[in-house]
Image (spheres, rainbow, N blue to C red):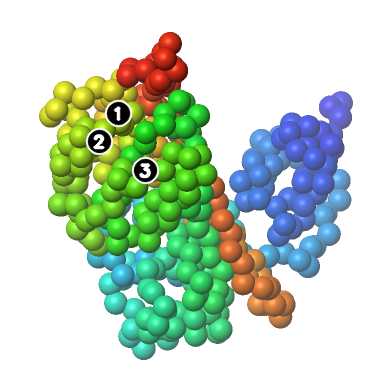
Amino acid sequence: MTKPLTVRDIAEKAGVSLGTVSRVMNNAANIDPALKEHTLTVIRENNYIPLRRPRRNTRRNAAEGGRIAVLFCDMPHQWNESYFSRSYAAGIEAVCTAYRVETEFFTLQDLCGDTFFRRLAKFDGVLIKHNFGPGDPRAERINALAEKIPVAGFGTNFPHCRYSQTFLDNHSAGALAARELIGRGHRVIAFINPNPESEMLRSRGEGFREMMEQSGLWRPELFISRKLATVAAPDPDPVPPLLGGTLERLLAFPEKVTAAIVANDWGCVGLYRACAERGISIPQELSILGFDNQISICASLNPPLSSINNPLADIGKTAAIELFSRIDARKRELALPVSRRILSGTLIERGSLSRLTRNSNNNNAITGEQTR
């Protein structure tokens, strides 16, 4: 007769602890949704039946089975299928599926109507991404809404928002980009921000500047931050920024510029085109590094573009979990402090970076060895 499986057997098959299996069986709230689903899959595949019925856990997350609204504000419908919107939404939907929460997505250019705010108040909670600055009446209305129902922001960090937010540390991402190139032997490095109106891109530039200053390598002439042709917000750009003039500026610099960081991947497309027009070889003559890791862009360029990853899906997941914690706390009449959850970027290295060597005169060699 086959010996019945035990909780320990399930834990070993799932590669988790006994405590994790116990929390899954008792539908506990303090468990990662992906880990919970993995453990449940192992339980189902092995037809495991507990010898006794698990006790009912009174701390089951009260957000389960509920309904939330997800708002992408101050943006036209052309952005519905953008890389950023789809990535955020994928992360949010993954958590909502695990918690059996119904989601309703809204892409809005206007957020002032009383009728819409009354509609929002009927949801269990709201996830929101917007670019409303201090003093904007729309930002104040969202703050007021957060006093009535749980609200959590994602993708931006605004001190004037009185609710929890989850976002990428863009300042540290800019510093990371500089540090990675310095570590590969680059010393004369340019930074190009094709849209200085973006707070996100400005923050990346500040992180770059501080790291270069700390390293004694800061050259203000190579910090180029200005609105470039064809960059039009808030619509998705149909044509990459024209960076021919910017490249000429780098080529005319008294020292040889060996690397350029562009504040987003789309801007790198413009720099690649400018290099191709002038016969500049990437990365042998110029290493290029972008931000956001848009796969459709990075993989289409030749050589493939290295980029600092923006963990958009993880930001969506983390924000959703934060919102569910607040929904649960509210229904239990508990108060949670406002939080700022900061995620870090990482380098995704492809073929656009070189590692410089030093010649006999202890100067950087003009050409470098491709690092990937």
Q: Residues within 10 Å of mark 1 (few under 14, many from 20)?
A: some
Q: Percent from the top left, x then y, of residue 58? A: 78, 67
Name the residue: 72% across, 57% down. 30
> Which of the pair 19/128 is nearer the observer?
128
Q: Residue furthest left?
A: 277
In the displayed structure, would residue 339 be above or below residue 318? below
In the displayed structure, would residue 210 be above or below residue 79? above
In the displayed structure, would residue 351 be above or below residue 144? above
> Which of the pair 280/343 is nearer the observer?
280
Q: CA distance from mark 3 to mark 2?
A: 11 Å
> Which of the pair 240/283 is nearer the observer?
283
Q: Is residue 288 visible?
A: no
Q: Percent from the top left, x then y, of residue 234? A: 25, 62
Q: CA distance from mark 1 to mark 3?
A: 12 Å
Q: Is 328 placed left or right of 70 in the picture?
A: right
- For label 2, the SS is loop
**Looking at the picture, which amino acid does disc 3 mark?**
Arg
- For label 3, the SS is loop
**Looking at the picture, which amino acid does disc 2 mark?**
Phe
The residue that disc 2 covers is: 253
Instruction: Point out the image quarter for the C terminus.
Output: top left
In the displayed structure, would residue 309 be above or below residue 362? below
- For label 1, the SS is loop
The residue that disc 1 covers is: 256
Q: Residue furthest front?
A: 361
Asked if the residues shown at circle 1 and circle 2 are in contact, with their CB atoms under 8 angstroms apart, the answer is yes
Q: Which mark is residue 219?
A: 3
**Looking at the picture, which amino acid does disc 1 mark?**
Lys
